[in-house]
Amino acid sequence: MNRILLVSNRLPVSVQRRKGHLHFQNSVGGLATGLSSFYETYDSLWIGWPGVTLAGGNPEENQIRERLASASCHPVFLSQDEVRNHYHGFCNRTIWPLFHYFTQYAVYEDAFWEAYQRVNEHFCDAVVGIAQSTDTIWIHDYHLMLLPILVRERLPDAEIGFFLHIPFPSSEIFRLLPWRKEILEGLLGADLIGFHTYGYVRHFINSARYLLGHEHTMGQLNVGNRVVKVDAFPMGIDYDRFFDGSCDRAVQEEADEIREKAGKRRLIFSIDRLDYTKGILQRLQAFDRLLTSNPGLKENVHLILAVTPSRTKVEHYLALKRQIDEHIGEINGKHGSVGWVPIWYSYRSLPFRTLLVWYCAADVALITPLRDGMNLVAKEFIASKCDGKGVLILSEVAGAAEELSEAILVNPNDQEDIVAALKEALSMPEQEQIARNRLMQDRLGRHNVVKWAEEFINELTAVKSVQSELAAHRVNAKVRRELIRDFRRSKARLCLLDYDGTLVPLVKSPEEAKPDAELLSLLCGLLRTENTDLVIISGRDKTTLGDWFGDLNIGLIAEHGAWSRAPKAEWETIQPLTSQWKPELKPILRHYVDRTPGSFVEEKDFSLVWHYRRVDPALAERRLSELKDTLLQLAAAYNLAVLEGNKVIEIKNSGVDKGQAALRWLAKGEWEFILAVGDDRTDEDLFGVLPRHAYSIRVGIRTSQARFNVGSPRDVCTLLQELRAG
Ligand code: GDG
């Protein structure tokens, strides 16, 4: 396996200055804990911010560098200002609230955004300075969403993966971000983009489609000349560390001591970083309600609320801390009695062993985030149940809920639901607890964090090989040389060129695609080349093609072959075609236009076309499948064919396609050189009928019957320019 460069905002080791001295300690948080075990097993180097800011040229920099190097870590030093505006600003006050659906907390400030860009550039310098060509670069989380494209620009062939640890919100939320396009483009610099759940994948794909117009096939997007894959990789935990740890006798004894102290009282446990997304206040309110509505539970339960200090520089977190303190005081005051404190509260970072003991001792884990990318605590609790006993109550909007379906799932905003879940948990028979937990343990044990990381890395390698397979068909320098050589050597040349998406980019309205002076001059230049026939082979109607190209000495094929015209001659229909079916189908298409804002119908002599480029993509998808169903039934009755093009569906006489039209043109001469270029499904018919020696090229990086690919219409024009120059 290649070396892996892990890149995240924080390193697994944090440096702190206390009483003038530097201290090194393990970082807490989901990403650091989760990835540490994976990273220790592989040849890897971790790049990130060490957690302290130093004045430029501070000799401590070297001390930190050396110390971190021994832990295979490489520090990226940031100024105080950068940390304030990047981490505390854009990351924690813009992206974090927005991506967790707390739109009211999201702050949009230019200074934050500028720092975000700068810090991503610093990380890019660090990565580029270290990366070797065989390295796999794996970038993590929302602090570094611009990094993939920045690295791509400097290392175009690098293998880059990105994983987001927090939710990717619905496109309706994401679109609120002023820098939404930059963030999407930044992420799309990666070869593989991973999320915890398929829901987040869907949201990302929708955003890329709505905001950048990228379509996808099975999570695969074509971005420029690259294929980018987007998929779900639910993160696992270091299962054995928790399970084996919880079986350890000393750990069991400590857990027993806690239980003894609690006596007959049942223990409900929760631990979170201090964060408004974790639903801590709502959880306290639900516990209050439980005690109020079930007086019999008084003196019979304890809620152990462990909160780990986090982001204490952001005002919402400070306010939250105050509110938690107040709520706990109120609940303990209201329900407590001499000898019974309902809530045991800890506000500090716990050593791992203490955490493990609490997981073991607890009867119930109450984990109710209002939004959570995954939530590893829920998985850790289940893994720590060596004897299989214990009940997990989990918020249904935590990513982990998808895998932990045997837990009691709750809506974290519905206090009655949480109260009911607590009652169910406290009375669940042990046998049922064990049965549910063993199923979840089995899954968590198999799909642990190392498996998760391996799956991601393997998929990244697979994307790379799809890319190189497609690249093998790319018109590279060698193919280009051969093509130009063959063109020059030949005495009879035929160029069959599709128009929209091939000679000009696709645009929202068909009429905007009119050829400009530059394109016309390119075509005229080619037409002046001796022994060269040029044919535009298009789905456009004959009037438009005639208006645009009628004065040139060029062959024209319109309506995918229904009409054809030799240079400056009259239009001919190819076979007796009928349009008697149109009155029957037009009202149907009109009905679809009425129900689908942004769509319209184009009528050609022998076909009807429903255009949906400007339609909301999700609506278009749905209407398209309905319309196809309806049309296919009618098509058989009228001997029609239904043809899907690029954001259009066309109904025409069967037997008319670009392949048939091309065959007729091919039969007109003994062509030594043939070039055919097209961009969509309708051009596949053309590619399919060409002789073996023909150069067929599809615009766009996808599998095709064409022998070669190019990236864009610009590339096609450059190629034609070179032929002309020859
Ligand atoms: C982000 C996403 C996603 C916590 N306090 C202590 C402590 N921890 C450990 C837990 C767990 C981790 O930190 C927390 O992970 P979570 O997943 O619950 O939450 P976030 O920190 O918000 O993590 C989250 C995660 O990334 C991974 O992708 O699941 O959705 O928000 O491992 O055990 N560990 C110790 N003492 C503590 O006081 N030892």
Image (tube, rainbow, N blue to C red):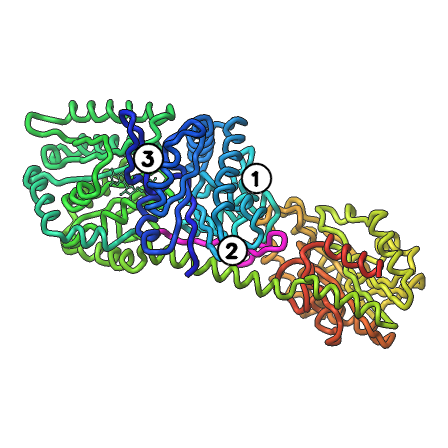
Quadrant including the C terminus: bottom right
Q: Nearer the viewer, mark 1 or mark 3?
A: 3
> Does residue 103 appear in the picture of this structure?
no
Q: Quadrant of residue 87?
A: top left
- Which residue type carries mark 2? Ser
Name which residue lies at 75% across and 65% down.
Answer: 481
Tell me the magenta residue range: 217-236
- In this rendering, does residue 307 appear at all? yes
Instruction: Find numbered disc 2 in the image and state the secondary structure of the residue it sits on.
Output: loop
Q: Which residue is mark 2?
A: 133
Q: What residue would you read off at disc 3?
A: 15
Q: Which residue is mark 1?
A: 182
Rounded to the nearest angstrom, the CA distance separating label 3 from label 2 is 30 Å
* Residue 225 image position (x, y, % from top left): 62, 55
What is the C-alpha distance between the residues marked 2 and 1?
Answer: 26 Å
Classify mark 1: residues with Cα within 10 Å, few (<14), some (14-19) or many (20+): some
- The crowding category of the residue bearing disc 3, from other C-alpha atoms within 10 Å (few below 14, some 14 to 19, many at least 20), is many
For the N terminus, give its image quadrant.
bottom left
Q: Amino acid at mark 3?
A: Val
488 relative to 443, above or below: below
